[in-house]
Amino acid sequence: MAGKWLTLMAVFGLVPNVGAGQQFALPPNPPGAAGSNQDLTVPPVWGQIPSGSAGPAAYPPSVPRERQAPPGVTLAELEQASLACNPTLVQATMRIRAAEGDYRQSGLYPNPVVSYLGDEIGDENTAGFQGMTVGQELVTAGKLRLGQAVAGQAIKQAQCAFQAQRLRVLTDVRTAFYDSLAAQQMVALYGQLVDIGQEGLQTTEKLLAGKEASRVDVLQARVEARSVALQLQNARSQQAGTWRRLASVVGKPDMPLTPLAGNLEEQLPPLTWQEARSRLFAGSPELAEAQAGVQRAQCALQQQLAQRVPNLQVQAGMAYDNSTGYNTASASIGVPLPIFNRNQGNITRAEAELTDARRDVERLQLQLQQRLATAFQQFESAWQQAEKYRGEILPDAGQSLKLTREGYRAGELNYLTLLTAQRTYFQVSLSYVQSLQSLHVSRAAIEGMLLSGGLGPGAGPTAGPAVTAAAATPMVPAGGAAASAAGE
C-alpha cells in the first residue's frame, strides 16, 4: 500500500504550470467576485474602458491576477520592435511623402514660355525680323487652390492608411503573442504530465513487483506515459511554429525562441456591444480614409467645374526689322472659346465618383458592423467558456480527482479510474488555456479595429496623376487674337 500512496500523492500533487515559476491554480474567488484593477498588458487602442460601464452584458468578469508574470519578452517590447522593423510601415510612410509631393506640385504656377521670333528672313537680302517673345498662362477660377484641396485630401487618406497599417501590424503581433503564450503554457502543462506519467509508471511497476497491481495496470501506465511524451513533442512543435509566426510579423525572422512574459488570466476591462460598436465607428482608420475620400471627390468635382473657365494666354515680344531699321513690339492675349469642349465628360465622371465615394462610406459602415458581430461573438463565447471553466468545470475536475484518490486509497477504485480522472483534469486545464487564448485574441481584434494582415501589401489611397491648372486650356499661338504696335 505504500507504493499506492506514493502514486496517489504524486497524482494529487498535480498542479500544471502556466509558465516558468508560475502555477496554474484554481482561482479562489467565485464567479463575479471583485478582482484586481491592474491594467491590461496590451494597452487598448481606445484607452481604458471605465469599469463602471459594465452591466449584465459586459465581458469579461473580474479574473484576479494572483501571480506576477515570469521574466521574459514582454508584449510591449515586441510591439516596439515591430513598429521599428516591419517594412510595410516604411512603405506606408513613403505613400504619405508621395501624396505630399503631389500636393506641392498641384499648387505650382505654370512656367513662362520664351520664344525666338524670326520672320521675313532674306527679304531684300536682309535678316528680316529678328526678336523674341515671352508668354505666360494666367490660371483662372482658383484652379490651383482647388488642385491643392484635392491633393490635401489625398494626404489625409495616406495618413489614415498608415494608421490602418500600424493597427494591422500591432494586431498581428498581439495575436501571435497570445498564441505563443498559450503554446508556452501548454508545453508547461504537458511537461508536468510527462513527469507525473513517468513517476506513475515507476510506482506501478513497484506495485506489480509487490503483487499489489496487475500487469494490465503497468501496461496502461506505460501507454499513458508514452502518449503524453508524444503530446509534449507536439506541443513543443506548436510552440516553435507560433514563435516563428510571431518573429515574422515583428520583422525579425531570425529571433531565437525566448520565454514570453505574460499571464492569460490577467484581468481585461469590460466591454459591451454598444461600446465596441461606437468606438469602432469613431476610431476606425478605414472609415476615416473613406470619409476623406468623400471630401476628396467633392474637391475634385469643384476642380472639374472650374475647368470650364478657360485660362488666359498673354504674350509680349520685341523684334528688329533689318530691312527698314525699325524696332517693333507685339502683344497678344488669347482665350479658348468653350463652344465644343466645356469639360462635360470630366464633370460627369467626378459626379459619379462622388456618389460612389459616399456609398462606399455606407458600405464600409455595414461591413465593419458585420465584422464586429463575428469578432464580438467569438469574444463573448470565449468569455463564457473561460468563466465556466474557471468557476465550475475546473473546481469539479479538481474535486473529482481528489475523490478518486480517496477511493483508490480505500481500494474502492482501480488505477484506470484514477487515470481517467487525471486525464479529465488535464484536458479541462488545457481547454481553459485555449478559451483564455481565444478571449485575448478576439479582444485584440476588436481593439485593433478589426484590422489584420500586417505583412500584406499596403493599400494606399487611389491617386492618379495630378491634374494641372492648364490641363483644359491649350497655349494660344503667337498669331492668335494679337494686337501689335510698331515704332521707329
Image (spheres, rainbow, N blue to C red):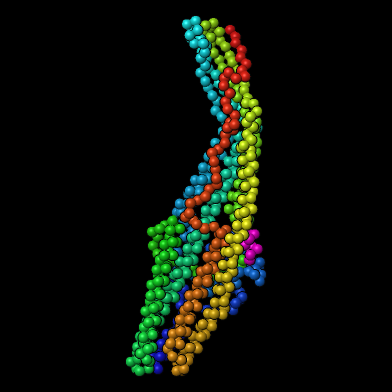
Whether residue 276 is in magenta: the answer is yes
- Where does residue 191 sit, x and y in percent of width and height? 40, 76
Q: Is residue 200 depicted above or below 134 in this figure?
A: below
Q: With 307 as the anchor, is 179 left or right in this view? A: left
Q: Residue at x 61, y 67 (%)?
A: 270
Q: Is residue 456 depicted above or below 208 in this figure?
A: above
Q: Nearer the viewer, residue 127 or 236?
A: 127
**Quarter-of-image position of residue 10:** bottom left
**Residue 215 shows in the view:** yes
Q: Looking at this view, name the residue that lies furthest to the front.
A: 340
Q: Residue at x 58, y 60 (%)?
A: 371
Q: Is residue 258 depicted above or below 410 in this figure?
A: above
- Count of numbered badges drawn on the protein: 0
Whether residue 303 is in magenta: the answer is no
- Where does residue 348 sit, x and y in percent of width and height? 64, 39
Q: Overall secondary structure of the magenta stretch? A: helix
Where's the C terminus, which quadrant?
top right
- Where does residue 447 sit, x and y in percent of width and height? 57, 61
Q: Residue at x 62, y 26 (%)?
A: 336
Magenta span? 272-279
Q: Nearer the viewer, residue 467 or 316?
A: 467
Q: With 208 as the anchor, is 336 left or right in this view? A: right
Where's the N terminus, which quadrant?
bottom left
**Residue 261 shows in the view:** no
